[in-house]
Amino acid sequence: MGNKIYRYSLAGLSTLGICMALYVCLSSALLVALIVIALAIVILSVGERKNVIDKVYRLIGDNKALNLGIIALFILLLPFLVQGNNYLLHIAIMAGIFSIVALGLNFQIGGIGQINFAPAAFYGMGAYTSAFLSVKMGLSPWLGTLCGLLMAIVLGVVVGFPALKARGYYLSLVTIALQIIFTLMIVNSPWIGGPNGIPGIPSYQIGGFSFRTPVALGGIQLPYQVNFLYLVYILLALFALAANRLYNSRVGLAWNAIEQDPIVAACQGINLTNTQLLAFCLGAAYAGIAGAIYGHYTSFIGVENFDFSQSLIFICMVILGGTDNVPGVVLGAVLLTMIDEKLRDFSGYRLLMYGIVLIIILIIRPKGLLPKRIRVYQQKDRSEYSSHSAVVTGGSR
Amino acid sequence: MLELKNVSTRYGQIPILMQVNIQVARGETVCILGANGAGKTTLLKTILGMVKPTAGEIYFNKQRIDSLPPHNIIAQGIAIVPEREGLFPKLTVENNLLMGGYYEQDPGNILARLAEVYQAFPWLPQRLKQKAGTLSGGERKMLGIARALLANPQLLLMDEPSLGLAPATINEVFNVITRIKRDKEITILLVEQNARKALLVAERGYVLQKGAVILEGPAAALQENEIVKKSYLAAGSF
Amino acid sequence: MELIISQILNAVMLACTYTLVGIGFSLFFGAMDIVVFCLGDVAIAGAFAIMALSTVMGVYASLSGILPAPISGIIVVFIGACFTAGLVTLMYRAVIVPFEGKNINASLLSTIAAGIVIRELIGLFYPEGRNPHAFPQLLPAGLIGDNVLLSWRNIIIIAITFIMVMLLYWFVNRTKTGLSIQAISQNKEAAIMVGINWHRIIVITFLIGGFLLGIGGFLTASYFNSLRFDMGAMYGLKGFCVAVVGGLGSIYGAIVGGLLIAFVEVFVTAFIPGGTAYSSVAAFLIVVLFILFKPEGILGEKTVEKV
């Protein structure tokens, strides 16, 4: 019994530690953030060598409800923690939006092992569709978001179709080409603002309440970002859970089978066409929603938010965090968004940093900060001392 | 001339060769028999330095070679007739042949050897400008042998010369091997599954099973050995 | 008619600038089965080196004090090309060797990242690096006849490309090292088995390819008359497209592909109203179609996927 409480509190503490580390990164200067990240990398590497990380994972996995609760509470309290600082909240919102895109991109990179260089096009498709419909057609932003999602899926099919025939370098060229075509088309289409972008995008409304009005919560006046923060993180939670379910489902397994060898996968009865298109369409759907929200949040979108270098940044997020591992991808997206924002003062060095970070990560930690875990299949009605944990922990019976 | 002392190799965690001891004396023809997966090809690659042994020593002409890169080992006078596709399919037959003489500096020597090879394979001169990839299976094997001869090696390694060939072609290949033995002062290490043919041309043999040498002896003795008879000379092989 | 002829000439010039970088892609893909995505940036870095030699560092000026102008021009371009040869070999060591034998996605991303690093380093550290520069004219400018396009400069660009391709052809097919490159690209294991020093040949391939890239960068900068730090991204991408359309791994393919892509671009720009904006779109669409329906390219050989 004591053991159980001990494990319970340990799990809670480790989640809390992660949250606090992220908070410190968010609220402090660049140098502190970099030190925290470096420390985290050291802890992860040492922990892996001593197999501590596996235990932490199991602790967190065994106490899912508690840890999700802590994370939810952390997000809920974040506006108060940063004392309503709207810049920090903005970073947190962007981290959430990018996390959704990165989760979607991961279906392609992590799932079927194909690098898609056009996630920013999916993201932009959602943003432009929703913005165009709500600005020029006066459609409700909610409906616009839905249309953005659908159009992104259409683009997902367009990009995903070549992936059925081409792999590796050829597919990368196709996706790069489509990404560049996308940005060129936007720049050359005056009816969606061309190089000037779309300004004045309306915000979401529920009843008469616009998401762009500040709110008073618990006697504290909070900026309007709070609304978007909660919206984005509710969606992120849903999408992350869905991605996790997918990873553990037959679909996730089929994706990984295709990644290893498409011919063998087909011989096992996996429908290559549907399964691969699904990876692209789902990814596009994630990115499309994120893009639409981005537009309605910032009220302005321009082509530079959706170009090839933005795609590379999304790829960096997935690779840095850990391909095919939902917490890893989210971590990668959150970390890179924060570093990126903190590098605003050195914006000239921004892309250089991405290039160097990508090379270093690929060389020293090719599987990312939190590498993919081995799938564990358990019976649904597992009791607290399931056979799995009993075996691995050496028997706590 | 060639000596392997307690050589072990592994791919990752999987051991392929275990403490293999093999000696080949100058002028000898030695065959190594083994089934699929016995480690025959790995053995040849280990000699050539393409696979580094995890333990043991390899000597060629009394010189230790196991830490050298492949091109340095081959430059000392070892040539190989690779299994199946050892050719450069888009190069002409002539260029394929010339790649065999990679380490010969003197063009006169190369011309002399070419003449020799043309004599041994009379069909070659007419096909010089043809792409090697368009040759038939038997012709490719012959070209592989011809290419190895162009290096004028002291030691000739042959990796399953009979693999994937029709019976008549196999006979032809082994006739060529016999001729090479007769005409040239050359040491041959032959790796084969076709034990009957191999034991006919070889003087001595080793039997490799699951990465270890389980038998060795003169070819005649091996032919009479029960294990060899049962595993390698049973009906069905010719 | 006049218009068409001058557009054809224009397309041939553009094809020349694409061909050399396309050959670079094919050469490295042939030798190592790898696509090095930073080649465009390497080539443009070479053009920057040539520009630095002739302006900031004043090498060209001091050379032309002693030597006739064409010879000092050749020397400067040669030094620039040697610089790219070194740079691409450095790239090989830094971002290709660590990923040898691993998943191709790793080397793909690392070479793209290397391209960004080269590009950004130029932007940060070349004087006024982020502004467009007028490329110093090392080629004679005089016209031949009265057509604006028929200038000595353009003829020399075509001639240099032609000479480079011929030299490469001779090298690859007539020398022992060239044959070794082909041998490695066709059957690496057999190449090692005949005693080819694999590593040395690969480095030589990179040196030669890098040299060609330097010349390519120089020709591109001379053709456009201007140089920007981020030109390399698009230039490299077009080079890859050219190599794919022609047949990845085939030297002649790069020429044919270069001509096709250049003709499409030039003719879309010239003959479709408002086509300027869509010339790249058209070129990329062609590549996508090729990958979908004829992935082996025009001159490449069909490969059967290995099971």
Image (cartoon, helix red, strand yellow):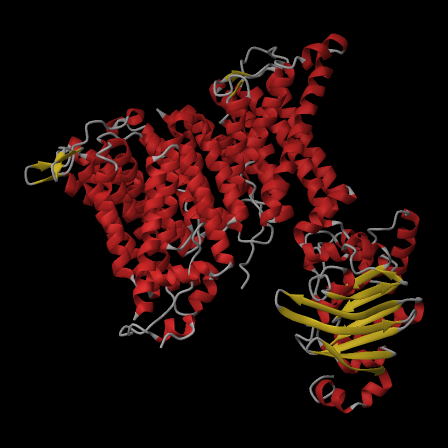
Extreme residue in the front direction: A2
**Can you see residue C272?**
no
Q: Is residue C173 above or below residue A3?
A: above
Q: Can you say whether C138 is above or below B49 in the image?
A: above
Q: Position of residue A22 (x, y in %)?
A: 34, 43
Q: Quadrant of residue C67?
A: top right
Q: Residue furthest top?
A: C65
x and y, in percent, of residue C8 in the image? 52, 25
> Is residue C86 or residue A325 the one in the foreground?
A325
Please tell me in which quadrant of the rendered image residue A272 appears. bottom left
Number of marks present in the image shown: 0
Judge from the rendering whether residue B127 lies leftward or rightward of residue C267; answer left or right: right
Residue A68 image position (x, y, % from top left): 26, 55
- Residue A55 in view (yes/no): yes
Q: Percent x, y for residue A244?
A: 32, 58
Image position of C156 with respect to A284: above or below: above
Task: Examine the image and state in which quarter residue A259 appears.
Answer: bottom left
Left or right: A332 as drawn, with respect to C69: left
- Residue depicted at x 28% and y 61%: A64
Task: Using the image as rendered, state which of residue A331 and residue B220 is in the foreground.
Answer: A331
